[in-house]
Image (tube, grey):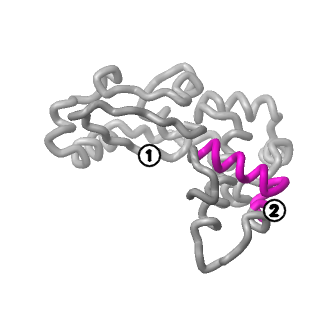
Amino acid sequence: MNSFKDSLIEIDTHLLGACLKPATFANFYTHASQNELTNNTIALEKANSFSVDKTLENPFSYFNHFYSDRIKSKNCLLQSELNDIHSTNGTISIYDLAKKNFTTVRQLERNFKKLIGLSPKEYSNIIRFQNALNLIKNPKLNRSLLDIAFECGYYDHSHLSNEFKRNTGLSPSSF
């Protein structure tokens, strides 16, 4: 997901989520492009790979074995690019990211869409927002939203507030 999504869940529905690192989903499932799955929810019954009955018995153990048995020993083609984005907290420009990794912006965008399902800019925005959110949640810092916005690479307070609303469904003040 690259934005907030509100969902209604029926009574007696079992919900279990797995948070995977970027570009690892492709190690377990084969799709032409991870972009096909962006912002979609896949029911276990439709994934054709899980035993729903076994997930209800002991879900954590089942998923641990399921993924451990299927992990592929592929190196992520984008590991260097992902490290660069994380080390700059999402503030590196896509042009600089491509240049630093000896590729073109277009090729970088293609690889990100295929392996992660997001453009490098969308992914960078998520990392930048996570950094801002961590600063907002830290009461010891006692900093204004404007200071946090500038530190995290936002143009102004309004820019951060809009990103906050898009990602959480809430305003920073109601958070």
| Side of 87 where 32 appears, left or right | left
Element at label 1 = loop
| Side of 106 where 40 appears, left or right | left
| Residue at (17% x, 45% y) in the render | 58
Element at label 2 = helix
Residue 170, percent across and down?
58, 49
Per the rendered image, the range of residues in magenta is: 149-167
Residue 55 sits above or below residue 37 on the image: below
Q: Is residue 70 magenta?
A: no
| Side of 18 where 121 appears, left or right | right
Report which residue position mark 2 lands on.
150
Q: CA distance from mark 1 to mark 2?
A: 29 Å
Closer mark to the observer between disc 1 and disc 2? 2
Quadrant location of the C terminus in the rendered image: bottom right
Residue 123 sits above or below residue 113 on the image: below
Residue 6, percent across and down?
48, 36
What kind of residue is marked 2?
Phe
| Residue at (71% x, 74% y) in the render | 143
Dot 2 surroundings within 10 Å: few (below 14), some, or many (20 or more)? some
| Side of 33 where 148 appears, left or right | right
Residue 96 sits above or below residue 47 on the image: below
Report which residue position mark 1 lands on.
19
> Is tag 1's residue or tag 2's residue first in the polypeptide sequence?
1
Dot 1 surroundings within 10 Å: few (below 14), some, or many (20 or more)? few
Secondary structure mostly taken by the magenta-highlighted segment of the chain: helix
Residue 56, percent across and down?
18, 38
What kind of residue is marked 1?
Cys
